[in-house]
Image (cartoon, rainbow, N blue to C red):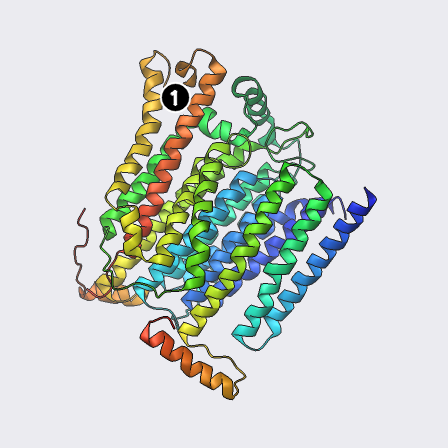
Amino acid sequence: MIENLELLIDVCLLFFLLLIVFVAIKTTNLFVATMLFGIFSFVTALLFLDLDAVDVAFTEAAVGAGFTTVLMLSALRLTGAFENVKHRHSILGLFIVVLTGAALIYGVADFPNMGDANAPVHVHVASEYIQLTQEKIDIPNVVTAVLASFRGYDTFGETVVIFSAGVAVLLLLGMGHVEPKHEPEKNLVLWVVVKPFIALILIFGLYVQFHGDFGAGGGFQAGVIFASGFILYSLVFGESYARKVVPSSILPRFAALGVLIYGLTGLVSLLSDKTFLDYSALSSNPVSGQHMGILLVESGVGLAVFSTVLLIFYSFSGVNHNE
Amino acid sequence: MMINSMLSDICLLLGGIFTLTGAIGLLRLPDFYSRLHAASVTESLAAPLLIIGVMLDTGFTLDSAKLILIIVVMVIVNPTITHALCRAAAHGGITPKMQSESTQKNKLQTETEFSSKEPK
Amino acid sequence: MNELLGHVNYWIVIFLMMMGLYMVIASSNLIKKLIGISVFQASVFILYITFGKITEGSPPIITDNADVYSNPLPHVLILTAIVVGVATTSVGLALIVRIQEAYGSMDEDDIHDMNDNDDFNIKSRSKI
């Protein structure tokens, strides 16, 4: 059993997840369902860690357990219905779900065992990427190398998707304005502890951004962590003060600037007679060109994610409920 | 480093026992405030013990320096979070289950403090 | 027995997926539907990361004392997918807030009834 310890932890965490979702289906209290969803995201992050996916666990913890829970709580506060949600049983739905599940389990019978080193997914491109990262890019974190350099085009699309989500939320909700009288009450313990802690969060966000080449990290995680520093400030000290620190007018511009940095990095390569996002055009030595390219691209991503996350939070907190 | 390895095992075992105690308390105690009290055992005692157990095992490297930072941050922040939860519960109107005369007086004081929104 | 242990991860993930799908189909509240979609999404992520795991492997960060690395390619795909997922969740929540303002209710059946009777009003909110 000792060599299967990872499998044991993995199965325990998965059963935990099943239990959480089962209670979330049964409950009629929306606040309980939201909190259970936060716990679900956190246990998923633990599961990713057990399955050797450190970058993914980091992102899921920051984005899923952190930002999504805050967002859902803001939405619940705005819509106001908390308890005694109508609970509906659907026999047809149960039948469809059981049928689909049975079909999927039948299809899964052909899959290779979990952890098999000769599975088809490991044979084609993955070992090549690990090899090429050591030769051509020379940074320890293979996931960042693949994300920013080998599959950089997909990451550009992802950055544009985040930007579009920010634009969509702006179109739906607007930035709103916050009247200063709806302030939380003075709370000495929170004020004293949170003030230096926000500085720590911002420094940690910058550390994750620049350390993403050497360990787990990167632009996405860093953007979310940096934004959550400001979200914490807004929650503890009041939204009107937070809007003085980071005015709501600069956030859409910063988000666009992040996407622009990414695109311009690719355009520089295009203008130097090479393909789009070919980083060897950025410097005389191709390896240092890769380093420069990954640095620029990740900072563009970090800026775009930070601005969009904070923008979405401002939109939700600025909706005036009593209009 | 036999003594280090044995100490690390003891710390990990104790951390596990305290986590279990906190979890049992979280489920079995009758009232919100006492449950919060039990949960704070996990964050203030069990988690630092577990991290110290891991630190003793890895020795004196960059990783254990990062773990010391994590312990410092956890010990400062988690009791603050418990305080914030408790304050939110008092603001929301949850009263302790077992009340005595002094609790009634405190309840009146808490209610006036929250309704006038001025610090005492 | 080895087959069973190798596949138990897949079965539990499929069960999780189906519970998320049931939550989308059977709940009448919009926020619970959104939670169901997110649970479905997360179970797909777990499935992909399970594909990438190699036994006795280490995380795909190149160090000196590891010879087999887990497959980094599913990690990259799921990293993108998680962030796109949170983007769609936030747009979904913004839509729910506006629906609540227009119809006054977050229940699917009531909204369908009001839609059939044309009983709603939408205010414009964005002043970018």
Q: Nearer the viewer, residue A137 or B14?
A: B14
Q: In the orientation shown, which residue stands out farthest toward the bottom? A: B101
Chain at numbered mark 1: A
Q: Quadrant of the N terminus of chain B?
A: top right
Q: Quadrant of the C terminus of chain B?
A: bottom left
Q: Nearer the viewer, residue A234 or A160?
A: A234
Residue B63 percent coordinates (x, y) = 63, 39
Position of A53 relative to A123 (above/below): below
Residue A161 percent coordinates (x, y) = 34, 38
Residue A101 percent coordinates (x, y) = 53, 53
Q: Amino acid at mark 1?
A: Leu
Residue displayed at 53% across by 73% down? B33
Position of A75 relative to A305 (above/below): below
Position of B98 relative to A303 (above/below): below
Residue A268, image quadrant: top left
Q: Nearer the viewer, residue A202 or C14?
A: A202
Residue B88 appears left or right of A260: right
Residue C2, image quadrant: top right
Secondary structure beneath label 1? loop
> Is residue A305 among what the camera can see?
yes
Q: Nearer the viewer, residue A309 or A183?
A: A183
Q: What is the tally of numbered marks visible in this picture?
A: 1
Residue B16 appears left or right of C47: right
